[in-house]
Amino acid sequence: MSLTVETLKRRIAVAAKRAPADLVIKNAKIVNVFTREIIEDDLAIVDGFFAGIGQFEGSKTIDVDGNYIVPGFIDGHVHIESAMVTPSEFANVVLPHGVTTIIADPHEIANVSGTNGIEYMLNASEGIPLDVLIKLPSCVPATPFENAGATLDFSDLSPYYNHPRVIGLGEVMDYPSVMQNDENMLYKLNDAHTKDNHIDGHAAGINGDGINVYMAAGIRTDHECVTAEEALERLRKGMYVMLREGSAAKDLITLLKAVNENNARRCLFVTDDKHLDELIDQGSIDYNIKLAINEGIDPLLAIQMATLNAAECFGLKTKGAIAPGYEADFLVVKDLHTIEIDQVYKSGKLVAKNGKATNSPVLKIAPEPLIIDSVKIRPLSREQLQINIPHGSLANIIEILPNMIVTKHLVEKIDSHEGLFQYNLKKDLLKIAVLERHKMTGNIGLGIIKGLGIKNGAIASTVAHDSHNIVAAGSSDRDLLKAITFTSEMRGGLSVVQNGEILASLQLSIAGLMSDMGSREIYEHLKDLNQALIKIGCSMAFNPFITLSFLALPVIPELKITDLGLFDVKTFRHINVEYDPMSEKS
């Protein structure tokens, strides 16, 4: 609610006890994130805001019987599309986990559908019982080394700063463009600065000199730390560090080693990319808090990181605390060590109880036809999936590191027959393919991967960060071809194939990223996919689909693949599958 003279007058009247509150919370143990202490008192709420702490009368009272009142959690960086649900369904999933505000970057759908995708996410998140604050996607495409479905320059983004829920520029992942003063990037950065908006960073593998460049450009956050040393480097340079625990990147426990009483106020929690099944089974920011507490972080400090720190990072002056003049987004929690959430309130209204959202209708916002019809590829044959390489050659290979989005660049001797790469299941050497799916260019990037674990079958997906071309991997050309063509025919999604048969699939018809089904129905499809993954040999020590989706992201070290071929992130250039020592050194 915008603050008017009348609402201000009413709030002051309640605070001064001249008028009754709309709602009074009695017998509460209030978690004070400013002083990190527990205060036993009552709370007065009017017009969705806290008006006072103390003894108040109200039109309605709720006795919480000595339970804790905790500020609503804030996810400081998340892509809704990664949960494969629409924004209203996303709200139904995360509200029971205490998340009342998210900072969302529609980077994924924008790479597929451009401004149509941004418009869809803004419209589909309007009026839902979750505050969805938007960061405009800064890098569409993420790099010039791949083909996305759209290109957005500063003039495309600039008008959206007038939207009340747009609060800044999303993760700047094209470090070379920043460092080299690329004109379009400079205009994007300057436009955000001129409008006094926050700018997010993406500093994967960037050293201290690179952090200097980002900070000088006004970029103030990073969610790509994978070591405690990297986190400290960023903290010392003045950045906020986002402690990430998602589905592919599980960095939190390692990063907590860098957190102490002196620097914790510059740390906050994010999920970034988290699949629906893990959101339902584990949780969201509440899961990050629980992990932190289990690692020895004081519960009040962990809650402070999930609330006040995030609010201050983004300049959200009325969020992140239980205090007069702050939004009445709060949780009723039974135990601070286990973060057992009983109830969730948004703007003073109950939105979740006993692990379920209350009265949260699914808002059906019809996407533009171009968003639905987003998967277009040319007819494909097995011959187009073959890798030409002489027998006994050394090959550049992508090695998967479990539960990490960084990879290792291996050079190994591979098997070849009549000049064509041969799968080696004993060594876990499989084939990976990325097919451009936006403009029917016919581009196919081919490579060799190690560590995915498929024994007999193939998987394919249109979730392939960040350009979201079709990415597929498998143990035979037949299954690889079947998985790719089926995924294309169902207008996007995930599929698992064995011996030419579809074992399981999930259609994602909204930009090839999201489904219009309910979260429970999607969840059941994901369980079927997981069973199919086990059947084709995956150990499930990590999620193969999530891992596969990041193998196509050419801004995360060391070796990735795009629709144009293998990409060496260290040198920022494409390389051949066959290893050439002279070329690699040049």
Image (cartoon, rainbow, N blue to C red):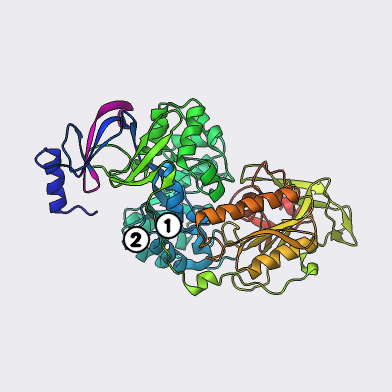
Crowd tier of the residue under label 2, counting other residues whose Cα lies within 10 Å: few below 14, some 14–19, many 20 or above? many
Q: Is residue 18 above or below residue 165?
A: above
Residue under numbered circle 2: 161
Residue 327 spot, x, y in % from top left: 27, 44
Crowd tier of the residue under label 1, counting other residues whose Cα lies within 10 Å: few below 14, some 14–19, many 20 or above? many
Magenta residues, as a range?
34-49
Residue 403 spot, x, y in % from top left: 63, 42
Residue at 48% from the left image edge and 37% from the top image edge: 288
Quadrant of the image occupied by residue 250: top right
Q: Amino acid at mark 1?
A: Ser
Residue under numbered circle 1: 88
Residue at 75% from the left image edge and 65% from the top image edge: 481
Task: State whether residue 263 appears in this view.
Answer: no
Q: Is residue 418 above or below residue 265?
A: below
Quadrant of the image occupied by residue 462: bottom right
Instruction: Report if the CB atoms under discs 2 and 1 are less than 8 Å apart.
Output: no
Seen from the viewer's position, the closer of residues 248 and 16 is 16
Q: Give the mark nearer the N terminus: 2 vs 1.
A: 1
Q: Main secondary structure of the magenta part?
A: strand
Distance from disc 2 to disc 1, alpha carbons, whole Å, reads 23 Å
Task: State whether residue 441 appears in this view.
Answer: yes
Question: On residue 156, which mark appears?
Answer: none
Seen from the viewer's position, the closer of residues 104 and 290 is 290
Is residue 533 rendered to the left or right of residue 325?
right
Quick one: SS at disc 2?
helix
Is residue 279 rendered to the left or right of residue 443?
left
Is residue 354 rendered to the left or right of residue 323?
right
Seen from the viewer's position, the closer of residues 57 and 40 is 57
Q: Amino acid at mark 2?
A: Tyr
